[in-house]
Image (spheres, grey):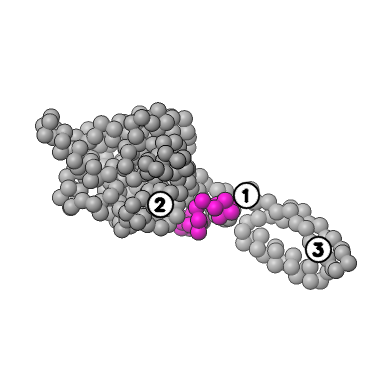
């Protein structure tokens, strides 16, 4: 019995550290000694903050890959291997394109540091992470292909999304902008990209813009696409803010819920450029509940 008391003291320390209550204690005496049976429950006084983030972007924008990188804490191989954590249907795996809504989460501790699972697809790993998390960012991946537009709209209108991220693949967007410039004389974003931005605005959802795949373009092309994005945002009454420093992150965290600024992050899921900025922002965003 004395040995069981020692074990119970150790269990109590573990539970205190994990903020778990020992709700019931039962001691059973057997021929070989004592057995302790305990019922544990999460301490409801430990508040867990949750934010929902909807990812929008046309086909091949890199949404699934970025979410996979965020959820796993590991960079992509340049061929989209991180998106394997989301794609489930056979046609998705064959084409490498999302056809349905998929969800992963990124959990954080009390200091806002990410808690990465060893395998995001493991149910046991998910339980373990969720059991110690103090904040959870739910990352919703919607299809970008035009034929699945209704599913994308359903993800925005039918779910409680507190924030949005519009992904723009810089390499493809540059070509589309140049094509529009040659045919109309006006440098403008692709129709689908503009629709996604307007959808966020119409829902009055604070959102970010991620210029993705910056490792695939030159500085000149990146600057050109960035200038068109800024011009587009200003035309719809938003203030673009390119996130380049810790000071910019502080401004984002302070002002994003006012829904006036639109932070712009220049990201590569291959070499990791500014992924840490996005993780830092997600880990410190306040729930946007009105």
The mark that comes first in sequence, 1 or 3, is 3
Task: Give the quarter of the figure containing the N terminus.
Answer: bottom right
Quadrant of the rendered image containing residue 143: top left
Q: Are marks 2 and 3 in contact (CB under 8 Å)?
A: no
Left or right side of 18 for 197: left
User: Distance from label 1 to label 3 (Cα)?
Assistant: 30 Å
What segment carries the magenta color? 108-127
Quadrant of the rendered image containing residue 141: top left
Residue at 45% in and 37% down: 101
Q: Which type of secondary structure does the marked residue at label 3 adopt?
A: strand
Residue at 18% in and 37% down: 177
Nearer the observer: mark 2 or 3; the answer is: 2
Q: Badge 1: few (under 14), some or many (20 or more) residues near its Cα, within 10 Å?
A: few
Left or right side of 29 for 100: left
Q: Which residue is mark 3?
A: 35
Q: Which type of secondary structure does the marked residue at label 2 adopt?
A: helix
Residue 116 within the segment the image draws in magenta: yes
Q: Which type of secondary structure does the marked residue at label 1 adopt?
A: loop
User: Distance from label 2 to label 3 (Cα)?
Assistant: 45 Å
Residue 262: percent from left, percent from top: 31, 41
């Amino acid at each position: 019995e004395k040995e069981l008391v020692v074990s119970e003291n150790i269990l109590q320390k573990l539970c205190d550290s994990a903020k778990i209550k020992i709700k019931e204690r039962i001691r059973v005496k057997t021929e070989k000694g004592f057995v302790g049976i305990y019922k544990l429950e999460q301490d409801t006084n430990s508040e867990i903050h949750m934010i929902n983030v909807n990812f929008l972007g046309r086909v091949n924008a890199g949404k699934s890959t970025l979410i996979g990188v965020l959820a796993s804490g590991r960079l992509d191989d340049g061929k989209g291997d991180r998106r394997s954590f989301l794609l489930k249907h056979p046609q998705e795996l064959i084409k490498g394109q999302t056809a349905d809504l998929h969800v992963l989460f990124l959990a954080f501790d009390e200091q806002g540091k990410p808690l990465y699972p060893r395998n995001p697809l493991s149910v046991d790993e998910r339980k373990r992470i969720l059991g110690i998390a103090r904040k959870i960012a739910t990352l919703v991946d919607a299809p970008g292909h035009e034929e699945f537009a209704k599913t994308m709209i359903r993800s925005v209108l039918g779910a409680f999304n507190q924030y949005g991220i519009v992904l723009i693949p810089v390499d493809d967007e540059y070509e589309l902008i140049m094509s529009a410039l040659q045919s109309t004389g006006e440098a403008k974003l692709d129709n689908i990209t503009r629709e996604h931005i307007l959808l966020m605005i119409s829902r009055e959802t604070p959102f970010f813009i991620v210029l993705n795949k910056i490792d695939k373009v030159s500085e000149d092309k990146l600057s050109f696409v960035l200038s068109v994005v800024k011009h587009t945002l200003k035309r719809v009454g938003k203030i673009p803010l390119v996130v380049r420093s810790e000071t910019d992150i502080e401004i984002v965290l302070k002002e994003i819920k006012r829904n006036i600024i639109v932070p712009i992050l220049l990201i590569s899921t291959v070499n990791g450029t500014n992924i840490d900025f996005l993780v830092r922002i997600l880990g410190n965003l306040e729930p946007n509940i009105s």
